[in-house]
Image: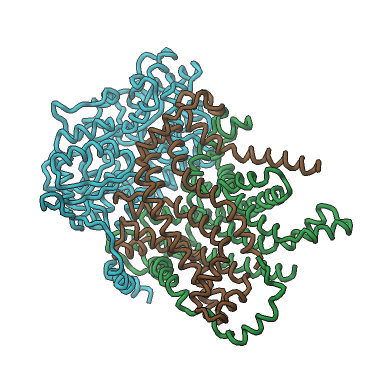
Chain colours: A cyan, B brown, C green
């Protein structure tokens, strides 16, 4: 009986209609004050309204590019709304679930979150962008972030790196002249900073996503430098977190804590406090993603004091690898009245000058570069790595959305001294296999 | 006398302690970043209103205030009309079915909102009401009916039946007896219903985010939190945004606060 | 409120004879019932169906899996742990919020010059959005010894970051916001206690405590019922505050049933499982409320 039920696959559309048809029919005609998506304007020409829902970090570049698009194509109006990541995720998934996707919405690259390109594309809800010109220049290493089964479903303006955001004044104060290039140099720099009365590394682990950044910064050197095909092997079940350099990375993470290089109470400290500690020079650095550089600069009295260097996760400088991941992007809904107009907007975003503009606003490395591309001076020290010593952010290749939140939680438990590395890796492996 | 005086001192001390979070909120919103990091606890010296002007423009609160007001006011009118009529019936009907209906309404208080979230969104979408005031008003009227019915029914049960009966002896219909005689007697509990529902509707963040996001009809909390999400690292600015979002509902509360206590007082006698 | 009580008996009987069957018509309840059915009942009932499926929350793929989701729940370490947190949080909130609310009510019920103002002060946090309150308290609870609560009290507590403290910190924030709510309901009950009863007890030589225990407390029974019920339901369903303050962390220290079911639906993409948890939560809340109503009604009758 249960098996019969188990095999009875139903279309959700049919199911919803079956359940809701009656109630909906009764009210459908009652009152409809919905603003028309196509309203006649000026000279009898129709205006298309496109709805976009994004995360707060996308507001700055989008505002700029939407205004530019308005000029280029006055017949299309884009109404955008933004909210913090958690809320947007809930909002967009509710709308996708009920079959009413916004024309354009935020999409995360790769596969490791409920709003990721491959999870939404697998459900058939993202429009195929493969025909657009810009997709042909997606670098080989980034393809898994953009593509599922060879088709492109997300647009992103470029990549950001994870490394140490540091306050140059604080480094000078402690007599540190050049950023460290090996793990032991890094430790001795921290030591000197500490002796100078500074917090060497600000850590805002109360904000869940911040917890992962130090592991992400180290794992490229402890795992991928030794085995660039680690992701494929892990997917095939040939290796695991517990059997790999993930263990070493976690040990290094905890060593920083043991040596007193973090601020007190990292689990009670938020991203905002972390930002202001570095910006005001109370702390010397923070391991962060380059996309939040604008936040650090906003909080600092002189923004030029802030720069970044790659976190050296290996004993010799030549084996240091860095994480460079595609930044959060957007996609177009596969179904709906305005698919073509929505895709046209994405095509517009794919133009070189617009990729440059978006990347500049969030201190990212443009997806493709030309003479007019600018690269934030703070991330220049990462450029030598991006060609062959960089790996995408780990979650972009994880098979489900549970591994990442488990990673957040186990790091908090480790920082609180309530768990062991064995336990933490076991939990992550369990989540990976779900 | 001395004991009353002593109690007064104690209660005022408790109130001052109670106000510490409010003090933190308001004083930080009046400080610049330097003051916040150097003297987080002190009074703002000198106070700056720059946070408020910046928050007001950046969060585009003007249009949101209009949206929130329209949605809240119309939902309240609908809730009071539907809720009071239904409760009058539920409080007076003497059949088992009537009691069952009352219990059915109360069930709405215990259901977690997540249970029906996606089907409800689908339904509102099928009705063509996503991104409209009407959709939000329909939502709030439905979702807050259980609590409204709970408050009204308790109150009406404590009212003697004679008022309406007397009117009916004079030849009035049920409708006239209710609207002319009974409803005015419900004023205290109506005050309570008004303020508690207004608080819920005005402050609700999640539903308007899902239903109104990107429509141009965003409510105050949606605008405020979009703003907060963007300026998280600037506490003064964020707190100024939070203050601006809360001021209207606090003012409404201050205007209605007498009724809140009275309404409960008379409702509980039953 | 009851000026007619004295003359109740006679006209009532006379009118009841003539109008005994004229309860208000069903039509009075019909519009409310329709809206309620459309907005609450129908979505909840059709939502429940997902608890028996493996739907991810998006897309067309869905199979019926019978009771499999409920079996998963039984073996889910994390969800089971969150039930413990939920109960602990609820009991703490119910006890502390109502104790504080009662004390405040007794305080502002006395003939104080400032009592009108005090009532407003204590009730004011109720009107502010819970998400906003959580934002504010997140700052107040920051571990820096020179600002927020630590700065005020000269402490060095990591309020939200220490797994053994965080749950209590959340309870504290909720109590701060809703103690005024309990206060108002108790105050309403206190205003129903006739002053003559106190005078009579005083003449009999009863002290303050005895008067409270034997005169006030029994008459507060309805207020206690409502307060305990509302705070229990609020505690069991608590979501906004936890979500905004800790999001369940550090680790899983403040994960409640509501945050777990939220994460399953929107973070992990397991809508079917999430609905199963929501259903269990709903049944649980309903059962607890029923038991409370039954128990307290008996107690009110006895008192």
- Which percent across, then down, holds residue C258? 48, 55
**Residue B127's x, y, as percent?**
30, 65
Whole-percent x and y of residue A417? 54, 38
Which residue occupies 27% across, 44% down?
A109
For residue A328, above or below residue A388? below
Pick the residue in front: B20 or B177: B177
Q: Residue furthest front?
A: B170
Q: Is residue A181 visible?
A: no
> Does residue A26 appear in the picture of this structure?
yes
| Screen quadrant of the N terminus of chain C | bottom right
In the image, residue C237 above or below residue A85: below
Q: Nearer the viewer, residue A379 or C223?
A: C223
What residue sits 15% from the left and 33% below the top?
A353
**Residue A337 sits above or below residue B108 on the image:** above
Residue furthest to the bottom:
C17
Taking C291 as reference, is A423 left or right? left
Residue B79 lies left or right of residue C88; in this view the side is: left
In this view of the protein, which residue sits in the foreground, A66 or A307?
A66
* Residue C8 point in image, percent of width and height: 69, 76
The residue that appears at 68% across and 43% down in the rendered structure is: C114
Q: Quadrant of the C terminus of chain C?
A: bottom right
Q: Is residue B171 above or below residue C303?
A: below
Q: Nearer the viewer, residue A17 or B51?
A: B51
**Residue positioned 19% across, 32% down in the render:** A356
């Amino acid at each position: 009986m249960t098996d019969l039920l188990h095999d009875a696959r139903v279309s959700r559309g049919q199911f919803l209609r079956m359940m809701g048809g009656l109630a909906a029919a009764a009210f459908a005609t009652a009152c409809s004050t919905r603003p028309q998506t196509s309203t006649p304007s000026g000279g009898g020409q129709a205006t298309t309204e496109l709805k976009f829902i994004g995360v707060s970090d996308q507001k700055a570049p989008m505002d700029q590019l939407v205004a530019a698009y308005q000029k280029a194509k006055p017949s299309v109006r884009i109404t955008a709304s933004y909210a913090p990541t958690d809320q947007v995720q809930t909002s967009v998934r509710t709308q996708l679930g009920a079959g009413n996707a916004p024309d354009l919405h935020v999409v995360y690259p790769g596969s490791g979150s409920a709003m990721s390109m491959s999870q939404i594309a697998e459900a058939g809800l993202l429009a195929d962008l493969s025909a657009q010109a810009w997709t042909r220049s997606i670098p080989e290493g980034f393809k898994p972030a953009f593509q599922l089964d060879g088709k492109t479903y997300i647009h992103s303006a470029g990549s950001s790196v994870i490394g140490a955001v540091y306050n140059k004044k604080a480094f000078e104060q402690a007599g540190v002249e050049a950023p460290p290039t090996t793990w032991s140099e890094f430790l001795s720099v921290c030591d000197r900073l500490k002796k100078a009365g500074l917090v060497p590394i600000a850590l805002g682990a109360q904000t869940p996503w911040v917890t992962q950044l130090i592991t992400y910064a180290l794992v490229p050197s402890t795992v991928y430098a030794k085995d660039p095909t680690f992701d494929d092997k892990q997917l095939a079940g040939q290796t695991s977190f517990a059997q790999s350099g993930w263990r070493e990375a976690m040990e290094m993470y905890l060593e920083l804590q043991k040596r007193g290089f973090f601020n007190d109470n990292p689990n009670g400290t938020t991203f905002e406090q972390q930002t202001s500690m570095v910006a005001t020079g109370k702390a010397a650095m923070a391991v962060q993603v380059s996309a939040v550089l604008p936040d650090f600069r906003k909080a600092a009295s002189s923004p030029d004091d802030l720069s970044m260097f790659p976190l050296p996760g290996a004993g010799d400088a030549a084996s240091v690898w860095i994480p460079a991941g595609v930044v959060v992007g957007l996609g177009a809904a596969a179904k709906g009245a305005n698919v073509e107009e929505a895709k046209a907007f994405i095509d517009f975003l794919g133009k070189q000058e617009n990729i440059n503009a978006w990347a500049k606003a969030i201190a990212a490395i443009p997806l493709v570069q030309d003479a007019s591309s600018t690269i934030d001076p703070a991330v220049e020290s990462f450029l030598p790595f991006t060609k062959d010593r960089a790996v995408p952010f780990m979650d972009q290749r994880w098979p489900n959305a549970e591994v990442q939140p488990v990673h957040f939680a186990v790091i908090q438990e480790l920082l609180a001294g309530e768990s062991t590395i064995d336990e933490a890796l076991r939990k992550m492996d369990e989540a990976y296999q779900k | 006398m001395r004991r009353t005086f002593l109690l007064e001192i104690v209660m005022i001390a408790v109130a001052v302690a109670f106000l510490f979070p409010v003090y933190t909120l308001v004083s930080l919103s009046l400080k610049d970043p330097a003051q916040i990091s150097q003297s987080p606890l002190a009074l703002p010296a000198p106070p700056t209103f720059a946070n408020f002007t910046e928050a007001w423009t950046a969060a585009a609160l003007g249009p949101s205030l209009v949206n929130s007001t329209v949605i809240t006011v119309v939902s309240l009118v609908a809730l009071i009309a539907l809720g009071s009529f239904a409760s009058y019936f539920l409080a007076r009907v003497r059949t088992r079915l009537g009691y069952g209906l009352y219990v059915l309404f109360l069930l709405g208080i215990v259901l977690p909102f997540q249970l029906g979230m996606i089907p409800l969104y689908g339904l509102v979408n099928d009705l063509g009401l996503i991104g409209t005031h009407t959709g939000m008003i329909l939502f709030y009227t439905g979702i807050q009916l259980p609590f409204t019915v709970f408050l009204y029914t308790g109150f009406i049960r404590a009212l003697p039946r004679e008022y309406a009966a007397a009117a009916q002896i004079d030849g009035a219909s049920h409708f006239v007896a209710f609207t002319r005689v009974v409803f005015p007697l419900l004023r205290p509990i109506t005050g309570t219903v008004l303020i508690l529902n207004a608080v819920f509707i005005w402050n609700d963040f999640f539903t308007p985010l899902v239903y109104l996001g990107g429509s141009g009809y965003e409510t105050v909390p949606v605008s405020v939190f979009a703003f907060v999400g963007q300026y998280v690292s600037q506490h003064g600015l964020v707190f100024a945004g939070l203050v601006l979002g809360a001021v209207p509902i606090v003012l409404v509360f201050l205007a209605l606060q007498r009724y809140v206590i009275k309404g409960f007082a008379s409702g509980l006698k039953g | 409120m009851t000026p007619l009580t004295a003359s109740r008996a006679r006209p009532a009987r006379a009118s009841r004879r003539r109008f005994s069957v004229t309860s208000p018509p069903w039509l009075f309840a019909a519009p409310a019932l329709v809206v309620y059915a459309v907005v609450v009942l129908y979505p909840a009932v059709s939502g429940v169906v997902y608890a028996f499926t493996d739907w991810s929350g998006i897309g067309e793929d869905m199979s019926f899996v019978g009771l499999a989701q409920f079996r998963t729940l039984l073996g889910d370490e994390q969800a089971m742990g969150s039930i413990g947190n939920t109960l602990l949080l609820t009991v703490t909130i119910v006890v502390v919020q109502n104790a504080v609310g009662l004390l405040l009510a007794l305080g502002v019920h006395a003939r104080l010059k400032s009592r009108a103002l005090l009532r407003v002060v204590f009730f004011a946090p109720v009107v502010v959005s819970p998400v906003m309150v959580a934002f504010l308290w997140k700052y107040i609870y920051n571990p820096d010894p020179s600002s927020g609560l630590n700065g005020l009290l000269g402490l060095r507590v990591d309020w939200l970051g220490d797994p053994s403290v965080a749950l209590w910190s959340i309870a504290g924030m909720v109590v701060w916001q809703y103690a005024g709510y309990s206060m108002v309901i108790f105050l309403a009950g206190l205003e129903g206690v006739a002053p003559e009863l106190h005078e009579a007890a005083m003449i009999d030589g009863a002290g303050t405590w005895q008067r409270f225990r034997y005169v006030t407390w029994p008459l507060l029974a309805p207020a206690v019922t409502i307060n305990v019920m509302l705070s229990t339901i609020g505690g069991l369903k608590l979501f906004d505050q936890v979500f905004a303050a800790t999001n369940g962390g550090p680790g899983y220290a403040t994960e409640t049933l509501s945050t777990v079911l939220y994460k399953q639906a929107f973070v992990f993409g397991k809508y079917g499982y999430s609905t199963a948890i929501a259903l269990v939560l709903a049944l649980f809340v309903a059962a607890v409320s029923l038991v409370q109503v039954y128990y307290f009604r008996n107690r009110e009758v006895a008192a």
